[in-house]
Amino acid sequence: MGFSLRRLLSWEGLLLLILLLVVAVNALLSPVYLGLNNQVNLFQLSIEKIIVALVMTFIIINGEIDLSVASVMGLAACVLAYLFERGVPMEQAVVAALAVGALCGAFNGFWVAYIGLPSLAVTLAGLIGYRGVARILLEDRSITGFPEWFNRLGQQPILGPLPLAVVLFFGLYMIALVVLNFSGVGRLVYVVGNNREVARYSGVRVPRLKMGLFIASGFIAALAGVLLAARLGAVRGNTADGFELDIITMVLLGGVSIFGGTGNLFGVGLAILIILNMRNGMALLNVTGNVQTGVVGLLLIFSVLIPNLVQDGQTLLQRRRARRKEVELKVKAGD
Amino acid sequence: MNGLRRWLRPEQLRELSLLALIIVALLIFGMQIENFLSARTFNRIAASVAIIGVVAVGQTLVVLTRNIDLSVGAIVGFTAYFMGMQLHANPSMPPLLALLLACAVGGLMGLVNGLLVAYGRIPAIITTLGTLAIYRMLLVNYADARTVTTDMVPAWVPGLAQANLFTLGDFGLRPMVALALAVVLLFQLVLVYTQFGRRLYAVGSNPEAARFAGLPARRTVLLAFVLCGALAGLAGFMFLSRFGNITVVAGQGMELQSVAAVVVGGVNTFGGSGTVVGALLGAVLIDLLGQGLIRWLGISEFWRDAILGLLILLAVASDALILTWLRRFWTPKETRLGRPSESVGPTRERRHGL
């Protein structure tokens, strides 16, 4: 990855610039921002979302979308809490929650991959339906009092200053990076996202790939839901409600096209850092969560709008240049 | 057979089957539940369908153009709160002006969505996910932890939801329900008979072809979003009229309910087919099943979402499977391709609409 102006002007370069800007502004405005505690805290507060953002990157590059992830997170947490309440040992409850997540993913995947329904509609049904099942399980109760080891897993550092979820995130990020960039499956994700039909005619087993991705998405979302339960120490029917907005924002801001086929995990990693640092900085300045979400919404829109405008400007310039050349040629010919 | 084909288009079949489902559900619930077929049930369903129905009409316009508007819930909440505050400040505001103001505020928000989608070329789902958060933020900041209560607004506002225009036995027609019906009727006529209506279908079924044919595709999409916003604004006013107490979470979840009504009502999420009447029937069916199943099976309110999710999935699946088969049946034999299409899913271009 040699240095070149071109790379600096690319999407990742722009993200890096924004990130440096955000970090610089935060460091100037808040004295505690750069402290180790705050930096770990910054990761820990949204760790579940960014774990899911990794697998969402695969899904969107593949040309699909999974709106149901937040509901699967909630459902997994609720299954865990429900079983715990019934006296099932915590270890078994965790396994069951993960299995339910994978099942939800398989259910989405079945309709999308094998029946050919649009993922937007299927996972919208999932978004509502899985949340509904979560509400049926817990109604309006709040379950707390999980075993000590479970809560500690979510809240205490296990590796240096890092808690389990943060360690897990970095591990998963490395795995995702290797799979997406250096493995056959990763190439297929791009190929199918670029052109499903061509991929199919080239002998790619598109349905199996999509099914696998949706199962992975459900499983990872469930894992994130369990981690969330461990961190908060309490589960309600509306746990993780509305997280899909943040997760999708991270991926799209990272330069992954909603139409599939382009984007990479470097960009998504930078986008994650930008959003986390921005939210953290705003929180340190006592900006409410609601305004933070609004700013993230603005960022989402501008992250797509600005490249579009730049492209429009470039085409306009090219056209003008072409026309000028044409006129010059005509003038020469006239002479 | 040819006569049947000519008279019964797939869309109409969808509406007829929805109507049949509604009647069957009414009959079953009527037999199983005491006092189900009463004026009270009718009023309760009509009141909630009136609001979501108006939002669904706007959503239909947008979905027809192969877009989606997820910000309608936030628009409903914002206009409901905004109108509550305005009517509190000027209690003498004439009702018609209040209605128009609500539509204008919603329309303005729709305009922002439309400009970003049509001229900024941002996919609708991204745009409206963003504006959903932004509009909700505006509401929370504007509200500043205050709430609107029923006694803050003039008496005619809640009256709109409770008075009867005329009564037939126990059944009464509330002004709000009449308003919703008028909106549905108006937009059904607009879709079928006006240039704008036909353009919505043209742009939705094939944007490229529509552009090459010289249709102002961008303007059509923009107008669809503006109208959707304005109708959400109107629904916001109806929300205020029905509930009276407005907090910052008002209208939350309505975006999904409206999409659900539209999808169950047979409007294709890939654009180009579906009707406003279908969307209304979808909204009615969802509400009827929600109310009926909860009372019949004695299950709790908490089941509603799970049932709704299943219903959407069934609707989309039946759309893809049954209508693919039906369209084959409708194509004349000589133009039929030798091999049936292997995938009922959209081609790449179609998926891009979202």
Image (cartoon, coloured by chain):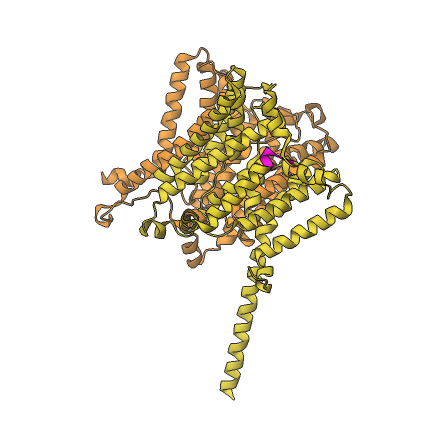
What span is colored magenta in the figure? A162-166
Q: Main secondary structure of the magenta part?
A: helix
Any part of residue A124 in sight: no
Q: Chain A is which colour?
A: yellow
Residue A164 included in the magenta stretch of the image: yes
**Residue depicted at 59% across the width and 31% down the height:** B251
Image coords of residue A59 (percent x, y): 46, 43
Residue pictured at 55% horizontal, 71% vertical: A320
In screen coordinates, is B55 left or right of B140? left
Farthest bottom residue? Answer: A335
Quadrant assignment, res A45: top right
Residue A176 location (% of width, % of height): 50, 44
* Foreground residue among A18 and A63: A18
User: Please, is residue A132 above or below residue B103 in the view?
Assistant: above
Asked if residue A219 lies left or right of residue B322, the reply is right
Q: Position of residue B202 (x, y in %)?
A: 42, 50
- Nearest to the observer: residue B348 or residue B279: B348
Q: Residue furthest top?
A: B34
